[in-house]
Amino acid sequence: MLKIEHLKKRFGNQTVLDDINLEIDKGQITCIIGQSGSGKTVLFRHIIGLIFPDGGRILLDNEVISSPNTTPAEFSKFRKRFGILFQGAALFDSMNVGENLAFPLREHTSMTEAQINKVIGESLEMVGLKEEFKTKMPSELSGGMRSRVGLARALVMKPEIMLYDEPTSALDPIMTDKINDLILSLREKL
């Protein structure tokens, strides 16, 4: 369970998060909806440890993972439990699809290249892409394909919790429905 208690964040004179409380149970899908500039992405960045609160705390399975006293080094042990699909997929433009998917595995595991290739193939299959996509560059992919590759990259580490930051914001309505259906089917499978 992910629990946010009395979260507060200010940037200079501007209060962005003011006493935010939220509880998300295992298997639950929760959407954070609000106007542009209302703090959705700031909340998201707190959950994944990119920034830390001025007040309050975040707990994962009743263990504090983020508070005003948390350091990035302390949070790093929790980061692997999260899979993240950023808006626009946030792929590395200088790496092909296979290299993008291999990156977290090479950085955070001791897998062999054969094991990495197997996980990449499985992850691509889960999001409905063929293994031949491994050699394509992000610039060669449509928006929907980039979202699928970003989702596959989030899945390679087999996260417990998936977070999506507007994964369909730049897609047409048909592709938006396909990505939303994919997210729901992966929740059921995983």
Image (tube, rainbow, N blue to C red):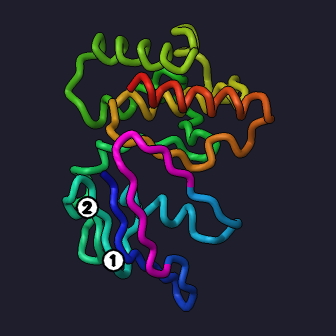
* Secondary structure state at the residue bearing disc 1: strand
Q: Which residue is mark 1?
A: 56
Q: Which residue is mark 2?
A: 65
Nearer-N-terminus badge (1/2)? 1
**Residue 24 magenta-highlighted:** yes
Q: Residue at x 56, y 49 (%)?
A: 165
**Residue 156 magenta-highlighted:** no
In the rendered view, tell whether residue 45 sits above or below residue 152: below
Which amino acid type is shown beneath numbered disc 2?
Ile
Q: Position of residue 59 (x, y in %)?
A: 27, 61
Q: Position of residue 83 (x, y in %)?
A: 41, 40
Q: Position of residue 16 (x, y in %)?
A: 55, 78
Q: Which residues are magenta?
A: 18-31
Q: Neighbour class for label 1 at 10 Å: few (<14), some, many (≥20)?
A: some
Could you tell whether 16 is left or right of 189 in the image? right
In the rendered view, tell whether residue 68 sits above or below residue 34: below
Q: Residue at x 50, y 77 (%)?
A: 17
Residue ranking furthest to the bottom: 13
CA distance for labels 1 and 2: 11 Å
Could you tell whether 170 is left or right of 107 in the image? right
On the image, which quarter does residue 40 sit in? Answer: bottom right
